[in-house]
Image: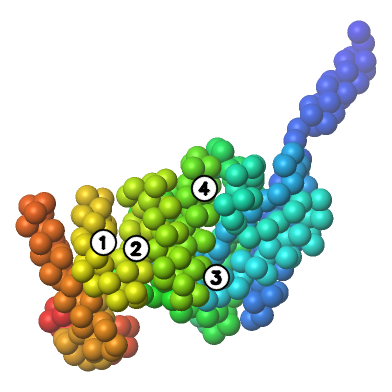
Amino acid sequence: FSMRSLKIVQFFLIMSLFACQAPVRPVDQPAYFKDPKEALAHIAKSLGRQITFVGSPSIKSVPVDEFFNESSAEVAVSGKVFQQQLTTMLGQEAKDINFSVLSKKNIATAQWIVLSSYSPIKDKVAEQPGSWIRLKTVVADVVTGKQLAASESYLQSSQFQGDPTKFFKESPMFLTDKRHKDRIEVMNGKAQPLKEKLTVQASFADAVALYDEGKFVEAEEGFSEVLKLTPEHQGALSGIYQSLWQQGKKIPAESAFGKFLAVGFDEGNISIKILFKVNGTDFVDAGDLPLQYKLWTKSIGQTMVAKSKCLDVTGHASKSGSSEYNDRLSLQR
């Protein structure tokens, strides 16, 4: 070959290599919004673009889970609303896929799952002045937990209804168990098998919905079904206690709380939510909380003795007030 022909061959080889490379999945830049629908539309459009680079599942039904709090595992009022809105928007962006709210029916055959979380971000992290909530959504493979697409946007805090839904507000503990941590890992790009967890999550979400509607007998039955799948599911154990308490069945409720607490001790996850009066060290006395607090602290003591465990008890104060005052109040609490 002449030198010229060698260069031509080399050129075509380089061109062939470039032609064989897979297209790079587009990644969007952080964007800040004052309108919730604009924040969700940004996520939906970004995921829609990315999905075109990874193809589509052979089974076109894709469940969409609720937005959950990254630190507490709670679902806020906006978290439920945003689930519905994002489901609709994703359907508009990827018309060949049927997106629907996570249920026992659609998770049974699903190949993909849409997971979403929310978390307040610190002022120093935000690129814009003000208070913001980060909304993060990923599309993942149900079996492997591999992340297929991801997007996030930032919503002005005043536009986010952060109050937990009834079930999570009345739960004695933050439900940050291993299942929650596995979801966080998938959100952060670390693959975790999801099929079994999502089957349980769908049943749990159904029971929570019944509780939020005030159907406590049906909710108790729903949480019992979850425990048949996973006997140590902390959310379902809490749900049994809460449902029994709401039905006025105090003795069975106390027994259920003991079982709930025992699992928490075994997993090293005891985060009992006891509220104090403002600027004081007395527990709040709203509704039947004093009765529940008495039951909780009694059960904690009994479980500690039975399991020969020790606890590191920590008190907290709000962000308002001076650091010195809050440190002193926290210690007193």
Q: Nearer the viewer, mark 4 or mark 2?
A: 2
The disc, 1 or 3, on the residue closer to the chain's N-terminal end is: 3
Q: Earlier in the sequence, mark 4 or mark 1?
A: 4
Q: Position of residue 193 (x, y in %)?
A: 50, 40
User: Disc 2 designates what residue?
Assistant: 240
Tag 2, which secondary structure? helix
Looking at the rendered structure, the secondary structure element under dot 1 is helix
Q: From this viewpoint, which residue is outermost toward the top?
A: 1
Of badges 4 and 1, the one in the foreground is 1
Looking at marks 4 and 2 on the same chain, the residue that comes earlier in the sequence is marked by 4
**Toward the viewer: 201 or 326?**
201
C-beta proximity under 8 Å, tags 4 and 2 = no
In the shown orientation, is residue 110 left or right of residue 276?
right
The residue labelled by disc 4 is 199
Pointer 4 and pointer 3: residues touching (CB < 8 Å)?
A: no
Callout 1 touching callout 3 (CB < 8 Å) = no
- The quarter of the picture where residue 158 lies is bottom right
Identity, as a three-letter code, of the amino acid under mark 1 = Ala
- Residue at the (71%, 49%) spot, across then down: 61
Q: Position of residue 53 (x, y in %)?
A: 76, 44
Q: Disc 3 marks which residue?
A: 79
* SS assignment at label 3: helix
Spot occupied by residue 2 in the image (x, y as percentages of width and height): 92, 11
Asked if one can make out residue 147 in the rendered structure from this viewpoint, the answer is yes
Residue at image x 88%, y 23%? 12
Quadrant into which the C terminus falls: bottom left
Horizontally, is 204 left or right of 137 in the view?
A: left
Query: At 21% from the left edge and 69% from the top edge, which residue is drawn?
Result: 251
* Label 4: how many Cα within 10 Å (few below 14, some 14–19, many 20+): some
Residue 57 versus residue 314 in the image, above or below:
above
Q: Which mark is residue 256?
A: 1
